[in-house]
Amino acid sequence: MSKVYTGASTSIDGYVSGPDFSGFDKLFAWYDAGDVAFTVPTGAMTVNLTPASAAYFAGLIQTTGALVVGRRLYDFTNGWDGQHPMGVHTVVLTHRPLEDNEHFTFVSGGIEEAVAVAQKHAGEKAVGLNSGEIARQAIDAGLVDEIFLDLVPVILGGGTPFFAPGKGYELEGPLSVIESASVTHLRYKVKYEAPESS
């Protein structure tokens, strides 16, 4: 079964956006902090990364076979104009399903169904989940293996937290630390308590 991870660019105080969806210019400044031109698989955008961030980003894209996102992000990006920039199949968890197509599948049966559908599309590759409520639901269900943090040296003071409030978890690691300009890329393993034997 394919590995499941979640990750995002986050501020030092743990937000993936500031109040009223602000702060993205600061959270994603590392996308323009270097001189390595990196074009996403769909060609939808080119960013200028440091060599360290380019290697990290390329590795993440190469190992990801499908994504799970929420309807709010899907609507906010206008469905990425037809295909996610990573060029992989994207499962949208929503109470208001749209018609499936070659790039998107819409499910309403819960996070377990969304991850299972994404794993079928991912094959041997990993499944990535967007942060926030999707990540919290998946972690609470014991479905997330690893967490990737692109830690940006900014304090937003409020907004949308990386993880929605819920049960706390312990992490193992960091499994990797990649220092770059305007960001530190961190990777952790999620520790789950073993179920009590009866």
Image: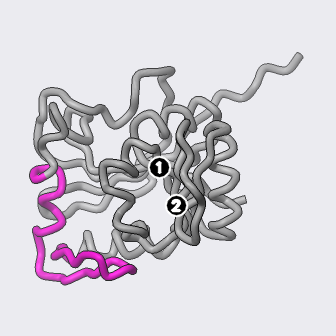
The residue at 34%/37% (across/down) is 162
Give residue 105's quadrant in the image.
bottom right
Q: Residue furthest right?
A: 198
Q: Are marks 1 and 2 in contact (CB under 8 Å)?
A: yes
Q: Amino acid at mark 1?
A: Val
Image coords of residue 78 (percent x, y) = 33, 56
Magenta-drawn stretch contains 32: yes
Q: Which residue is mark 2?
A: 90
Q: What separation in Å lies between label 1 and label 2 (alpha carbons)?
A: 7 Å
The magenta stretch spans which residues? 25-51
Image coords of residue 173 (percent x, y) = 45, 45
Q: Quadrant of the C terminus?
A: top right
Which class describes the residues within 10 Å of circle 2: few (<14), some (14-19), or many (20+)? many
User: In the picture provided, is 148 more to the left or to the right than 43?
Assistant: right
Q: Which residue is mark 1?
A: 69
The residue at 50%/28% (across/down) is 169
Q: Residue furthest front?
A: 99
The residue at 40%/51% (across/down) is 74
User: In the picture provided, is 105 more to the left or to the right than 76?
Assistant: right
User: In this picture, is 24 found above or below 182?
Assistant: above
